[in-house]
C-alpha cells in the first residue's frame, strides 16, 4: 500500500496560496488512494484468474495514469521548498546544465518555454543516463511521455489545478513563482542518484 506523503511544510510558500496548496495536496492524495484501489483490485483479479479482457484490462490500462499521477506529484512537491534555494555554480548538476544547454539562462528559458506550451501536463528536466544528457521534456498526460530509462531531476506541474486558483490563466506568473520555490538541493541529489 502506498501512503500519501505530508507536504504541509510548503504552506506559506511565496507565490502559492494555502488554499491552492491544500487543494493540490488533496488531489495528490486522490491519486495515492486510486493507485491503492487499482493495485488491490488487480491483485484480487489475478488471484481469481480473471486476467482477460474486461475489468482486468481496463484497470491495468488505468493504473499508469493513477500511479504516475501519484509519483509525479511526489517529485513536484519534493523539489519545492517554502523559500527555495539556488543551484550552486560548482554543483555537478549546474555543470551538466552548462554542458547541455550552454548556460543556466538558456536552460531556464527552455524550461519555462516548455512549461508554457498550451495544454495540460508536466514539464520535467530528465537526465538520460544512456546518453549522459539533460533534456527538458513536456509530458501531456501522466501516463504518456516519460522518457524510458531517464531520471526525473526537476518536475513542474502545469495542469491548471497547479496555478489557476492563484493565477487564473497567467501561467508565466505561476512559472516565475515555481522557479523561486525550487529546492535545488533535492534536484542535485536526484542528479547524483
Image: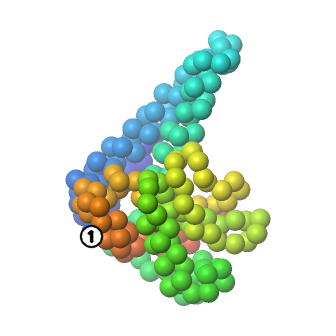
Q: Quadrant of residue 127?
A: bottom right
- Relative depth, front residue between 99 and 41: 99
Considering depth in this image, is 115 or 56 the residue closer to the camera?
A: 115
x and y, in percent, of residue 33 in the image: 43, 34
Residue 115 is left or right of residue 131, and the answer is: left
Residue drawn at 31 percent across, 71 percent down: 173
Closest to the observer, 114 or 98: 114
**Circle count:** 1
Describe residue 99's horizontal placement relative to residue 71 as left or right: right
Q: Could you say which is closer to the camera, residue 64 or residue 167?
A: 167
Percent x, y of residue 91: 58, 82
SS for callout 1 = loop
Residue 18's quadrant in the figure?
Answer: bottom left
Residue denoted by label 1: 14
Indicate the position of residue 123 as horizontal and vertical percent values: 50, 62
| Residue 73 in the image: above or below residue 58 | below
What kind of colouring is applied to the model shown?
rainbow
Q: Position of residue 6 (x, y in %)?
A: 37, 50
Residue closest to the far right? 130
User: Which residue shows up at 60% across the image and 18% down it?
Assistant: 54
Regarding residue 101, the answer to whether it shows in the image is yes
Decide: is 3 above or below 190.
Answer: above
Residue at point 24% right, 55% down?
Answer: 165
**Residue drawn at (44%, 55%) of the image:** 119
Amino acid at each position: 500500500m502506498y501512503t500519501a506523503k505530508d507536504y504541509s511544510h510548503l504552506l506559506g510558500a511565496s507565490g502559492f496560496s494555502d488554499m491552492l496548496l491544500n487543494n493540490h495536496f488533496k488531489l495528490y492524495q486522490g491519486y495515492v488512494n486510486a493507485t491503492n484501489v487499482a493495485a488491490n483490485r488487480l491483485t484480487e483479479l489475478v488471484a481469481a484468474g480473471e486476467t482477460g479482457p474486461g475489468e482486468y484490462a481496463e484497470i491495468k490500462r488505468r493504473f499508469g495514469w493513477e500511479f504516475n499521477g501519484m509519483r509525479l506529484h511526489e517529485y513536484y512537491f519534493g523539489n519545492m521548498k517554502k523559500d527555495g534555494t539556488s543551484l550552486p555554480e560548482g554543483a555537478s548538476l549546474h555543470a551538466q546544465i552548462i554542458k547541455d544547454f550552454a548556460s543556466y539562462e538558456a536552460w531556464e528559458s527552455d524550461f519555462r518555454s516548455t512549461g508554457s506550451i498550451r495544454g495540460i501536463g508536466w514539464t520535467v528536466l530528465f537526465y538520460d543516463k544512456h546518453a549522459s544528457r539533460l533534456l527538458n521534456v513536456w509530458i501531456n498526460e501522466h501516463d504518456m511521455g516519460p522518457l524510458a530509462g531517464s531520471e526525473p531531476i526537476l518536475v513542474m506541474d502545469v495542469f491548471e489545478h497547479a496555478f489557476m486558483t492563484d493565477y487564473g490563466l497567467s501561467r508565466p506568473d505561476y512559472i516565475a513563482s515555481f522557479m523561486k520555490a525550487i529546492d535545488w538541493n533535492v534536484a542535485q541529489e536526484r542528479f547524483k542518484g
